Image (cartoon, rainbow, N blue to C red):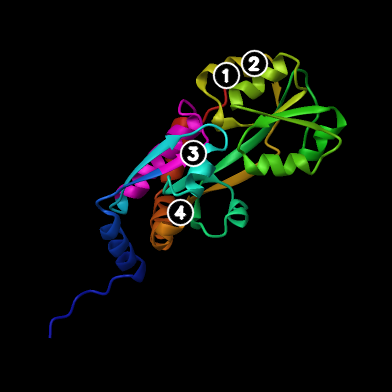
Amino acid sequence: MLRFPAMPLATLLLGASALAHAQTELVFGTTHDANSASFHYARDYLRQLCTESRLRCVLRSYPGRRSEALLAIGKLDGEVGRVKGYGLKHPDYARVEEPFNVVQTRIFTRTPVSISNWQSLTSFARTVSYKRGIFLYQQRLEQLLPKLQLHDVQSEDACLQVVLARRSEACVFDVGGLTSAAHPLLKQGYASASIEDLPLYIYLHKQHNDLAQPLTETARRLQARGIPAQLRRSYYELK
């Protein structure tokens, strides 16, 4: 009798799932600006994750809440860069359980202010801006109402600009979400240390739920090989 080496179940599942999707390019959305470090990091991570999973994937940047809306109507196959709590809002989506990145959340102000947590905002600010479409930032800030007036803006770059233009007293921003053009703006004000480090995940439309477990196993292998750390060294540097 011929005997074949046993293969892990996740590998067999991945092979079957990849074969089913092999002829299709999977399109993922993200709210990260296409010129930001976070987008470049996510694009390269997704490319490696999919290549090792024998899938064809592409990442596209969408403004504000458009990425979420397109996924909801099935115009995207998944989203890259959502927090774990996003799954509570969309329980029918499958999550790749290994986080692919960790975002540092900082506060930008015109003058130096002592900031150690979200609640610190209420001690000096009345108006606070954040990037439109970042669900967790919206949640955290809404918990501080009515002490704060909130303004959502189109991008992290715009968030810094409204503070410098004195239209807002503080900006909540993702370090990696800034474009290179925004780095000079940082030098015109003050950025706090991270007030919350947020693990980010990849979510899949329900029609691709079968890919979640095998992609999780692939993501864990990438983590074990230090791929995310290599990408962070390549793309993240707060200047």
Q: Which residue is mark 1?
A: 183
Disc 4 crowd rating (10 Å Cα; few below 14, some 14-19, many 20+) is many
* CA distance separating discs 1 and 3: 21 Å
* CA distance separating discs 3 and 2: 27 Å
Q: Which residue is mark 4?
A: 205
Residue at (33%, 66%) from the top-left corner?
13
Q: Quadrant of residue 238?
A: top right
User: Pointer 3 and pointer 2: residues touching (CB < 8 Å)?
Assistant: no
Closer to the chain start, of discs 1 and 3, is 3
Q: Nearer the viewer, residue 8 or 88?
A: 88
Type of the residue with mark 3: Thr
* CA distance separating discs 3 and 4: 14 Å
Residue furthest out toward the front: 73
Closer to the chain start, of discs 4 and 1, is 1
Vertical position of residue 206 compared to residue 62: above or below: below
Vertical position of residue 4 compared to residue 28: above or below: below
Disc 2 crowd rating (10 Å Cα; few below 14, some 14-19, many 20+) is few
Q: Secondary structure at mark 1?
A: helix
Q: Secondary structure at mark 3?
A: strand
Q: Which residue is mark 3?
A: 30
Q: Which residue is mark 2?
A: 187
Type of the residue with mark 4: His
Q: How many marks?
A: 4
* CA distance separating discs 4 and 1: 35 Å
Where does the magenta region start and end? 28-51
Front: mark 3 or 2: 3
Where does the image place residue 24, in percent across and percent down from the top left? 28, 49
User: Pointer 4 and pointer 2: residues touching (CB < 8 Å)?
Assistant: no
* CA distance separating discs 1 and 2: 7 Å
Q: Quadrant of the C terminus?
A: top right
Residue at (36%, 66%) from the top-left corner?
10
Closer to the chain start, of discs 4 and 2, is 2
